[in-house]
Image: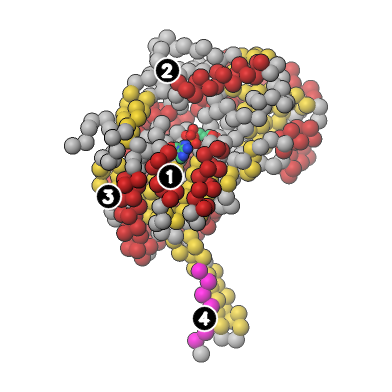
Amino acid sequence: MPVKGRLLNYVNGEWQPSSTAEYLDVTNPATGEIIAEVPLSTKTDVDEAVQSAAKAFPGWRRTPAVDRVQHLFKLKHLLDKHFEELAALITKDCGKTLAESRGELRRAIENVEVACGIPTMMQGYNSEDVSHGIDEFMVRQPLGVVAAVTPFNFPAMIPFWFMPYAIACGNTFLLKPSEKAPTTMQRVFEIMEQINLPPGVVGLVNGANDSVDAILDHDDVKAISFVGTTAVAKYIYSRAAENGKRMQCQGGAKNPVVVLPDAEPEATAEAVAASAFDCGGQRCLAASLAITVGAAHSPFAEAMADTARARRVGYGLLDGTEMGPVITADSKTRIEGLIQTGVDEGATALVDGRGTKIPEYPSGYFVKPTVLDGLDLNGEVVKSEIFGPVLGLLHVDRIDDAIDLINSGRYGNMACIFTRSGASARKFRYEVDAGNIGINLGVAAPMAFYPFSGWKQSFFGILHGQGRDAIEFYTEKKVVIERWD
Ligand code: NAD
C-alpha cells in the first residue's frame, strides 16, 4: 500500500511506489511545511521505467504524427483547465509568486502548442534526378527512449521544453524532476492520464543522483536533456557522452545587463529589478550584474536601491507579494555567505537582504533583495552564480569595456543592454558572447518556437531546447537514394 504523502513513480501507465527505502522531505519554502516525501528511486526502478518505454516505442513511432499530436491537443486543453490549480502547486513547490507561476505555466503550455505542429516541422526534404533517374530524400525518424533531468526553479516549464517535442516526434520519454520541487510534475502526470497515451510513452521517476546515474548508464536511453548547475551539466554531459548518448545540457549563468547613459534610470531600474529579483533571483535568466557606463552610474544605482527596498517579500500565494523565498535553508545560507564575500571583497551593500524574517512565516527561507555596489572585478562574487536576489553593480567608462568584461566571463546564457542608441544596441548584440540577448528588456526568454540558447559554460551540446532545435535533437536523419529503372 502506498504511504500517504509519499510520491509515486509513473511507469508503464501506472502509479507505483519506488523500490527504495530512502525518502527526502519536500518542503514548501515559504512556510517550512513538509508537503510530500520524494523517493530516491533505485537503478531497478529506472530500469523498469526504461524497459516499459522501450517496449512502447515501436508502436508509438508507427502511430502517424497527426494522430500523436491529438494527445497534445487534449493536453493543452487540460493544462488550461487546471491552470490555477497547477499555478498554486508551483508556488508551493518552489516559492515563486502566483503571478510568476502563472507565467511559467503559460510558457509550458506554449511548448505543447508548438509541438502540435510536428507533422509539418518533422518533414524532411527531397531532390528528384540527383543523377539520371535517381532521386534522393531525407526523412526524420525518432531516436527511441529519451530522458530529461530537470531543476527546481521551473518545475512545470522546463520539463515542457522537452516532453511535448520528444513524444510528438515519436520517441518515448522519461522524466526525472528535481527532488526539491517534484509535486508539480506528479500532478501534471496525473492529469496526463486523461490524454490516453499508450502505456510507457511517458514515464516519471523521482529521485536524485543515483537515479540520474542509472539513466546515464542505461543502454536503452538514446538521448538526455539536462538543465541545472554547470558542475552537474558538465558531469552529465561527459558521463553520457562516454556512454554514446546524444546530449543537451543547460548549465548555470551570471547574466549581465549594461546600462548606457541615455537609458531612462527609473524605467531601467524597474526592468532590471524585475529581472534580478523576480522568482527570488532563482532564474537562469536573472540579471545578476548591472554594468553602468559613464554617467549612468549614480542615477541608476539610486533608482535600483529604491526599487529593491520597496519590494514586498512574503508568501507567494498571497495577494500583493512581489517576491517569495529561496528554495531551501542551505540556499539561504549560501546566498547570505556570498553577500558577505562581496562585502569582504570591497563592495558596498546599498540594500542588504540578509537576516530577513517574515513574522507570519518564521520557518520560511527568505532573503530580501540585495544590491552590492562596486564589486571587485577580480573577486569571487563577480564570477560566481549566486542564484538568489542579489544584484552586483559595476562601473566602466565605455561600452567596449562593458563588452570586454562580459566576454571575459565564463557563462554565456543572457546579456541585455538598455539604451536609446540603435548603433550601440547593434554593436552589443553583434559582439557579445551570449546565447540570449535582450535590448531594452531585462529577461530575454525565447518563445517556444525559438531555441532556448546559451553559450560557453551555460550550455554543453549543439542543439538547444525548444523550437526547431528540439526536432533536430529528437530525430535522426535518414537519407534514401533510389533508382527505379
Ligand atoms: P542542480 O544541478 O542541483 O539539479 C538539477 C538536476 O540534476 C536535478 O534533477 C538533480 O536531481 C540532478 N542532480 C544534481 N546533482 C547531481 C549529481 N551529482 N549527479 C546526478 N544528478 C544530479 O540544479 P538546481 O539547483 O535544481 O537548479 C538551479 C540551476 O539550474 C542553476 O544553476 C540555474 O542557472 C540552472 N538553470 C539553468 C537553466 C538554463 O536554461 N541554462 C534553466 C534553469 C535553471
Residue that label 3 marks:
13
| Vertical order, 476 against 1 (above or below) | below
- Per the image, is 480 magenta? yes
Residue at 54%, 48% (x, y): give it. 238
Q: Secondary structure at mark 1?
A: helix
N-terminal-most mark, 2 or 1 = 1
Q: Amino acid at mark 2?
A: Gly
Residue 193 vertical placement versus 368 (above, below):
below
Tag 1: Cα neighbours inside 10 Å, few (<14), some, or many (≥20)? some
Local crowd at mark 2 within 10 Å, few (<14), some, or many (≥20)? many
Question: How many C-alpha atoms fall within 10 Å of the one at disc 3: few (<14), some, or many (≥20)?
Answer: many
Q: Is residue 188 left or right of residue 387?
A: left
Q: Circle 2 — which element?
A: loop
Task: Please name the residue that numbered disc 2 is placed on.
Answer: 364
SS at circle 4: strand
Judging by the rendered image, the residue that carries numbered circle 1 is 213
Q: Amino acid at mark 1?
A: Asp
Is the residue at mark 1 in contact range of ligand 1, meaning its CB lies under 8 Å from it? yes
Residue 224 screen position, x and y as percent: 47, 50
